[in-house]
Image (spheres, rainbow, N blue to C red):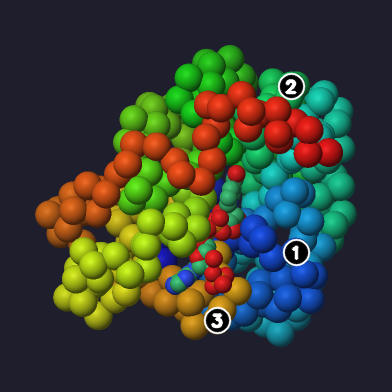
Protein backbone atom coordinates (compact mmCIF):
# COMPACT_ATOMS: atom_id res chain seq x y z
CA UNK A 1 0.00 0.00 0.00
CA UNK A 2 1.19 3.49 -0.79
CA UNK A 3 0.04 6.68 0.92
CA UNK A 4 -0.51 10.16 -0.44
CA UNK A 5 -0.05 13.34 1.61
CA UNK A 6 -3.06 15.65 1.75
CA UNK A 7 -2.81 19.45 1.96
CA UNK A 8 -3.44 19.06 5.72
CA UNK A 9 -0.23 17.04 6.07
CA UNK A 10 -2.23 13.87 6.83
CA UNK A 11 -1.44 10.68 4.97
CA UNK A 12 -4.25 8.92 3.09
CA UNK A 13 -3.98 5.34 1.76
CA UNK A 14 -3.95 5.52 -2.04
CA UNK A 15 -6.38 2.61 -2.14
CA UNK A 16 -9.54 2.31 -0.09
CA UNK A 17 -12.87 0.53 -0.13
CA UNK A 18 -16.27 1.96 -1.17
CA UNK A 19 -19.62 0.88 0.23
CA UNK A 20 -22.12 2.40 -2.22
CA UNK A 21 -25.11 0.16 -2.96
CA UNK A 22 -24.81 -2.05 0.11
CA UNK A 23 -28.08 -1.00 1.79
CA UNK A 24 -28.55 -4.16 3.87
CA UNK A 25 -27.13 -3.34 7.32
CA UNK A 26 -26.02 -6.84 8.31
CA UNK A 27 -24.34 -7.40 4.94
CA UNK A 28 -22.65 -3.99 5.03
CA UNK A 29 -21.25 -4.59 8.53
CA UNK A 30 -19.85 -7.95 7.40
CA UNK A 31 -18.44 -6.48 4.18
CA UNK A 32 -16.68 -3.68 6.09
CA UNK A 33 -15.23 -6.20 8.56
CA UNK A 34 -14.00 -8.40 5.70
CA UNK A 35 -12.56 -5.40 3.84
CA UNK A 36 -10.49 -4.46 6.89
CA UNK A 37 -9.44 -8.11 7.26
CA UNK A 38 -8.38 -8.06 3.59
CA UNK A 39 -6.10 -5.08 4.31
CA UNK A 40 -8.16 -2.01 3.40
CA UNK A 41 -7.61 0.90 5.79
CA UNK A 42 -9.66 3.58 3.99
CA UNK A 43 -13.45 3.21 4.00
CA UNK A 44 -15.67 5.46 1.89
CA UNK A 45 -19.31 5.87 2.90
CA UNK A 46 -21.87 8.71 2.67
CA UNK A 47 -25.01 9.86 4.43
CA UNK A 48 -26.81 9.09 1.16
CA UNK A 49 -25.71 5.42 1.21
CA UNK A 50 -27.85 4.88 4.33
CA UNK A 51 -25.23 2.55 5.79
CA UNK A 52 -23.06 4.72 8.06
CA UNK A 53 -24.32 2.90 11.14
CA UNK A 54 -23.38 -0.47 9.65
CA UNK A 55 -19.96 0.87 8.63
CA UNK A 56 -19.41 2.06 12.22
CA UNK A 57 -20.37 -1.37 13.55
CA UNK A 58 -18.06 -3.21 11.14
CA UNK A 59 -15.20 -0.90 12.10
CA UNK A 60 -15.89 -1.29 15.83
CA UNK A 61 -15.91 -5.09 15.51
CA UNK A 62 -12.64 -5.06 13.55
CA UNK A 63 -11.02 -2.87 16.21
CA UNK A 64 -12.39 -5.06 19.03
CA UNK A 65 -10.92 -8.11 17.27
CA UNK A 66 -7.58 -6.26 17.01
CA UNK A 67 -7.50 -6.37 13.20
CA UNK A 68 -6.69 -2.66 13.20
CA UNK A 69 -6.87 0.53 15.28
CA UNK A 70 -8.91 3.68 14.77
CA UNK A 71 -5.65 5.62 14.19
CA UNK A 72 -4.71 3.27 11.35
CA UNK A 73 -8.05 3.74 9.62
CA UNK A 74 -9.09 6.56 7.29
CA UNK A 75 -12.86 7.06 7.34
CA UNK A 76 -14.60 9.21 4.73
CA UNK A 77 -18.23 10.23 4.69
CA UNK A 78 -20.22 12.78 2.68
CA UNK A 79 -22.86 15.43 3.22
CA UNK A 80 -25.85 14.91 0.93
CA UNK A 81 -27.53 17.75 -1.00
CA UNK A 82 -30.61 17.74 1.26
CA UNK A 83 -28.27 19.09 3.98
CA UNK A 84 -26.51 21.52 1.64
CA UNK A 85 -29.04 24.28 2.27
CA UNK A 86 -27.09 26.37 4.79
CA UNK A 87 -23.87 26.45 6.80
CA UNK A 88 -25.66 25.21 9.91
CA UNK A 89 -27.46 22.38 8.10
CA UNK A 90 -24.19 21.02 6.67
CA UNK A 91 -22.42 21.39 10.02
CA UNK A 92 -25.24 19.53 11.77
CA UNK A 93 -25.16 16.85 9.07
CA UNK A 94 -21.53 16.15 9.96
CA UNK A 95 -22.52 15.66 13.60
CA UNK A 96 -25.40 13.39 12.59
CA UNK A 97 -23.05 11.28 10.47
CA UNK A 98 -20.61 11.00 13.39
CA UNK A 99 -23.49 9.85 15.59
CA UNK A 100 -24.47 7.16 13.10
CA UNK A 101 -20.85 6.03 12.69
CA UNK A 102 -20.41 6.13 16.49
CA UNK A 103 -17.13 8.00 16.01
CA UNK A 104 -15.65 11.15 17.56
CA UNK A 105 -14.16 12.23 14.25
CA UNK A 106 -13.81 11.17 10.64
CA UNK A 107 -10.74 11.62 8.49
CA UNK A 108 -12.48 13.25 5.55
CA UNK A 109 -15.85 14.88 4.92
CA UNK A 110 -16.90 15.56 1.34
CA UNK A 111 -19.72 17.61 -0.14
CA UNK A 112 -21.32 14.88 -2.24
CA UNK A 113 -22.39 17.02 -5.20
CA UNK A 114 -21.83 20.61 -6.43
CA UNK A 115 -25.52 21.30 -5.91
CA UNK A 116 -27.75 23.28 -3.59
CA UNK A 117 -25.99 26.07 -1.69
CA UNK A 118 -22.59 24.46 -1.85
CA UNK A 119 -20.67 27.52 -0.69
CA UNK A 120 -22.73 27.70 2.53
CA UNK A 121 -22.38 23.94 2.95
CA UNK A 122 -18.63 24.23 2.46
CA UNK A 123 -18.50 26.80 5.27
CA UNK A 124 -20.40 24.28 7.42
CA UNK A 125 -17.87 21.50 6.85
CA UNK A 126 -15.04 24.02 7.29
CA UNK A 127 -16.45 24.78 10.75
CA UNK A 128 -16.57 21.02 11.50
CA UNK A 129 -12.93 20.78 10.35
CA UNK A 130 -11.83 23.65 12.58
CA UNK A 131 -13.55 22.00 15.55
CA UNK A 132 -11.76 18.70 14.87
CA UNK A 133 -14.87 16.74 13.89
CA UNK A 134 -13.08 15.86 10.67
CA UNK A 135 -9.35 15.79 9.91
CA UNK A 136 -9.87 17.07 6.36
CA UNK A 137 -12.56 18.41 4.06
CA UNK A 138 -13.16 17.97 0.38
CA UNK A 139 -15.66 17.69 -2.43
CA UNK A 140 -17.01 15.19 -4.94
CA UNK A 141 -18.09 15.64 -8.54
CA UNK A 142 -16.70 19.18 -8.67
CA UNK A 143 -15.76 19.48 -12.33
CA UNK A 144 -12.95 21.87 -13.42
CA UNK A 145 -14.69 25.26 -13.60
CA UNK A 146 -16.68 24.65 -10.41
CA UNK A 147 -13.60 23.38 -8.56
CA UNK A 148 -11.55 26.37 -9.72
CA UNK A 149 -14.27 28.77 -8.53
CA UNK A 150 -14.35 27.06 -5.12
CA UNK A 151 -10.57 26.88 -4.70
CA UNK A 152 -10.15 30.54 -5.69
CA UNK A 153 -12.76 31.62 -3.13
CA UNK A 154 -12.66 29.52 0.05
CA UNK A 155 -10.34 29.80 3.06
CA UNK A 156 -9.56 26.08 3.26
CA UNK A 157 -8.72 24.41 -0.06
CA UNK A 158 -10.40 21.01 -0.42
CA UNK A 159 -7.98 18.14 0.27
CA UNK A 160 -9.69 15.72 -2.12
CA UNK A 161 -12.04 15.80 -5.11
CA UNK A 162 -13.76 12.46 -5.69
CA UNK A 163 -14.89 12.08 -9.29
CA UNK A 164 -15.58 9.29 -11.77
CA UNK A 165 -12.20 8.10 -13.06
CA UNK A 166 -11.51 4.86 -14.92
CA UNK A 167 -9.94 3.81 -18.24
CA UNK A 168 -13.11 4.69 -20.19
CA UNK A 169 -13.34 8.17 -18.62
CA UNK A 170 -9.78 9.27 -17.87
CA UNK A 171 -10.42 13.01 -17.32
CA UNK A 172 -6.81 14.12 -17.82
CA UNK A 173 -7.77 17.83 -17.94
CA UNK A 174 -9.66 17.56 -14.65
CA UNK A 175 -6.61 15.89 -13.07
CA UNK A 176 -4.36 18.73 -14.27
CA UNK A 177 -6.73 21.27 -12.73
CA UNK A 178 -6.77 19.40 -9.39
CA UNK A 179 -2.98 19.17 -9.44
CA UNK A 180 -2.73 22.94 -9.94
CA UNK A 181 -4.72 23.47 -6.73
CA UNK A 182 -3.01 20.68 -4.75
CA UNK A 183 -6.29 18.72 -4.58
CA UNK A 184 -5.87 14.92 -4.49
CA UNK A 185 -7.98 13.15 -7.12
CA UNK A 186 -9.93 10.15 -5.90
CA UNK A 187 -11.67 7.79 -8.31
CA UNK A 188 -15.21 6.72 -7.74
CA UNK A 189 -16.27 3.87 -10.01
CA UNK A 190 -12.63 2.85 -10.62
CA UNK A 191 -13.97 -0.36 -12.17
CA UNK A 192 -16.47 1.66 -14.25
CA UNK A 193 -19.16 -0.04 -12.14
CA UNK A 194 -18.53 -3.11 -14.32
CA UNK A 195 -19.47 -1.33 -17.58
CA UNK A 196 -17.67 -1.47 -20.96
CA UNK A 197 -16.78 -5.17 -20.42
CA UNK A 198 -13.96 -4.00 -18.15
CA UNK A 199 -13.52 -7.39 -16.46
CA UNK A 200 -13.08 -9.29 -19.73
CA UNK A 201 -11.42 -6.61 -21.86
CA UNK A 202 -8.98 -8.49 -24.11
CA UNK A 203 -6.21 -5.86 -23.93
CA UNK A 204 -6.39 -5.55 -20.13
CA UNK A 205 -6.44 -9.36 -19.88
CA UNK A 206 -3.38 -9.63 -22.11
CA UNK A 207 -1.47 -7.03 -20.09
CA UNK A 208 -2.52 -8.74 -16.85
CA UNK A 209 -1.40 -12.19 -18.07
CA UNK A 210 2.17 -10.91 -18.15
CA UNK A 211 2.05 -10.17 -14.41
CA UNK A 212 -0.38 -12.90 -13.28
CA UNK A 213 -3.06 -10.25 -12.73
CA UNK A 214 -6.70 -9.85 -13.84
CA UNK A 215 -8.15 -7.18 -16.12
CA UNK A 216 -9.66 -5.52 -13.01
CA UNK A 217 -6.25 -5.36 -11.35
CA UNK A 218 -4.73 -3.76 -14.47
CA UNK A 219 -7.45 -1.08 -14.51
CA UNK A 220 -6.94 -0.32 -10.81
CA UNK A 221 -3.15 -0.32 -11.05
CA UNK A 222 -3.30 2.13 -13.97
CA UNK A 223 -5.18 4.68 -11.86
CA UNK A 224 -2.90 4.50 -8.79
CA UNK A 225 0.15 4.59 -11.01
CA UNK A 226 -0.99 7.96 -12.38
CA UNK A 227 -1.42 9.26 -8.80
CA UNK A 228 -5.16 8.74 -8.46
CA UNK A 229 -6.58 7.34 -5.21
CA UNK A 230 -9.09 4.50 -5.78
CA UNK A 231 -11.97 3.10 -3.73
CA UNK A 232 -13.27 -0.04 -5.51
CA UNK A 233 -16.30 -1.79 -4.05
CA UNK A 234 -17.13 -5.49 -3.86
CA UNK A 235 -19.28 -7.52 -1.51
CA UNK A 236 -17.24 -10.64 -2.39
CA UNK A 237 -14.16 -11.45 -0.29
CA UNK A 238 -12.27 -12.99 -3.22
CA UNK A 239 -12.78 -9.80 -5.25
CA UNK A 240 -11.86 -7.45 -2.40
CA UNK A 241 -8.64 -9.42 -1.93
CA UNK A 242 -7.99 -9.33 -5.68
CA UNK A 243 -8.64 -5.58 -5.91
CA UNK A 244 -6.11 -4.75 -3.19
CA UNK A 245 -3.47 -7.10 -4.60
CA UNK A 246 -2.08 -4.48 -7.00
CA UNK A 247 0.99 -3.29 -5.14
CA UNK A 248 3.55 -5.82 -6.37
CA UNK A 249 3.65 -4.98 -10.08
CA UNK A 250 3.99 -1.91 -12.29
CA UNK A 251 2.72 -1.19 -15.79
CA UNK A 252 5.20 0.00 -18.41
CA UNK A 253 4.72 3.41 -20.04
CA UNK A 254 3.46 1.63 -23.14
CA UNK A 255 0.90 -0.34 -21.09
CA UNK A 256 -0.20 2.82 -19.26
CA UNK A 257 -0.83 4.46 -22.67
CA UNK A 258 -2.72 1.40 -23.91
CA UNK A 259 -5.10 1.52 -20.95
CA UNK A 260 -5.57 5.30 -21.27
CA UNK A 261 -6.38 4.87 -24.99
CA UNK A 262 -9.73 3.36 -23.95
CA UNK A 263 -10.95 6.84 -23.00
CA UNK A 264 -14.35 7.71 -24.49
CA UNK A 265 -14.13 11.32 -23.35
CA UNK A 266 -17.45 11.14 -21.54
CA UNK A 267 -19.19 9.19 -18.80
CA UNK A 268 -21.76 6.53 -19.53
CA UNK A 269 -22.73 6.35 -15.86
CA UNK A 270 -23.83 9.92 -15.11
CA UNK A 271 -23.67 13.28 -16.87
CA UNK A 272 -23.05 16.12 -14.43
CA UNK A 273 -23.53 18.68 -17.22
CA UNK A 274 -27.14 17.59 -17.74
CA UNK A 275 -29.68 19.93 -16.06
CA UNK A 276 -32.11 17.00 -15.84
CA UNK A 277 -29.61 15.14 -13.66
CA UNK A 278 -29.31 18.14 -11.34
CA UNK A 279 -33.10 18.42 -11.07
CA UNK A 280 -33.36 14.67 -10.46
CA UNK A 281 -30.83 14.80 -7.60
CA UNK A 282 -32.33 17.90 -5.99
CA UNK A 283 -35.77 16.26 -6.03
CA UNK A 284 -34.63 12.95 -4.54
CA UNK A 285 -35.72 13.99 -1.06
P1 LIG B 1 -16.87 0.17 -8.86
O1 LIG B 1 -16.26 0.71 -10.09
O2 LIG B 1 -16.05 0.00 -7.64
O3 LIG B 1 -17.52 -1.23 -9.28
C1 LIG B 1 -18.22 -2.02 -8.38
C2 LIG B 1 -18.84 -3.18 -9.16
O4 LIG B 1 -17.82 -4.03 -9.67
C3 LIG B 1 -19.75 -4.03 -8.31
O5 LIG B 1 -20.82 -4.45 -9.13
C4 LIG B 1 -18.85 -5.22 -7.94
O6 LIG B 1 -19.65 -6.38 -7.77
C5 LIG B 1 -17.99 -5.36 -9.17
N1 LIG B 1 -16.62 -5.85 -8.89
C6 LIG B 1 -15.74 -5.32 -8.01
N2 LIG B 1 -14.54 -5.94 -8.09
C7 LIG B 1 -14.67 -6.89 -9.04
C8 LIG B 1 -13.77 -7.84 -9.58
N3 LIG B 1 -12.51 -7.93 -9.15
N4 LIG B 1 -14.22 -8.67 -10.56
C9 LIG B 1 -15.50 -8.57 -11.00
N5 LIG B 1 -16.40 -7.70 -10.52
C10 LIG B 1 -15.98 -6.84 -9.55
O7 LIG B 1 -18.18 1.07 -8.58
P2 LIG B 1 -18.73 1.92 -7.36
O8 LIG B 1 -19.82 2.77 -7.89
O9 LIG B 1 -19.07 1.06 -6.21
O10 LIG B 1 -17.52 2.88 -6.96
C11 LIG B 1 -16.65 2.64 -5.88
C12 LIG B 1 -17.00 3.53 -4.69
O11 LIG B 1 -16.94 4.90 -5.05
C13 LIG B 1 -18.44 3.38 -4.18
O12 LIG B 1 -18.65 2.18 -3.46
C14 LIG B 1 -18.58 4.64 -3.36
O13 LIG B 1 -17.95 4.51 -2.11
C15 LIG B 1 -17.85 5.66 -4.26
N6 LIG B 1 -18.79 6.38 -5.17
C16 LIG B 1 -18.89 7.74 -5.01
C17 LIG B 1 -19.71 8.48 -5.84
C18 LIG B 1 -19.79 9.95 -5.65
O14 LIG B 1 -20.67 10.60 -6.25
N7 LIG B 1 -18.93 10.56 -4.85
C19 LIG B 1 -20.50 7.85 -6.92
C20 LIG B 1 -20.32 6.42 -7.02
C21 LIG B 1 -19.48 5.73 -6.17
P3 LIG B 1 -19.79 -7.16 -6.35
O15 LIG B 1 -19.98 -6.14 -5.27
O16 LIG B 1 -21.00 -8.02 -6.58
O17 LIG B 1 -18.53 -7.95 -6.21
Residue found at x 87% / y 54%: 99
Q: Give whichever of discs 2 and 3 has the lower sequence position.
A: 2
Q: Secondary structure at mark 2?
A: loop
Q: Which residue is mark 1?
A: 23
Residue 168 vertical placement versus 266 (above, below): below
Residue 248 vertical placement versus 130 (above, below): below
Residue 198 vertical placement versus 95 (above, below): below
Q: Give whichever of discs 1 and 3 has the lower sequence position.
A: 1
Q: Which residue is mark 2?
A: 117
Q: Position of residue 111 (x, y in %)?
A: 67, 36
Tell me the crowding category of disc 1: few under 14, some 14 to 19, or many 20 or more residues within 10 angstroms, Cα based: some
Determine whether, in the image, residue 55 is placed left or right of residue 187: right
Q: Which residue is mark 3?
A: 237
Q: Position of residue 60 (x, y in %)?
A: 76, 72
Query: In this view of the protein, can residue 273 be seen by the observer?
Result: yes
Residue 145 vs residue 197, the one in the foreground: 197
- What is the quadrant of residue 157 in the picture? top right
Amino acid sequence: MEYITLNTGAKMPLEGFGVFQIPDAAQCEEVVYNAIKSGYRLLDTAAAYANEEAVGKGVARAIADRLTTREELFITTKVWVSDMTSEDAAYEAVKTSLGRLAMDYVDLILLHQPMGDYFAAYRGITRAYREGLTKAIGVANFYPAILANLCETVEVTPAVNQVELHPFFTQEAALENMKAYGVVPQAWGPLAEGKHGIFTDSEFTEIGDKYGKSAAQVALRWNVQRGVSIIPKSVHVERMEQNIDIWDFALTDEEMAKVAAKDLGHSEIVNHDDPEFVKFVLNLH
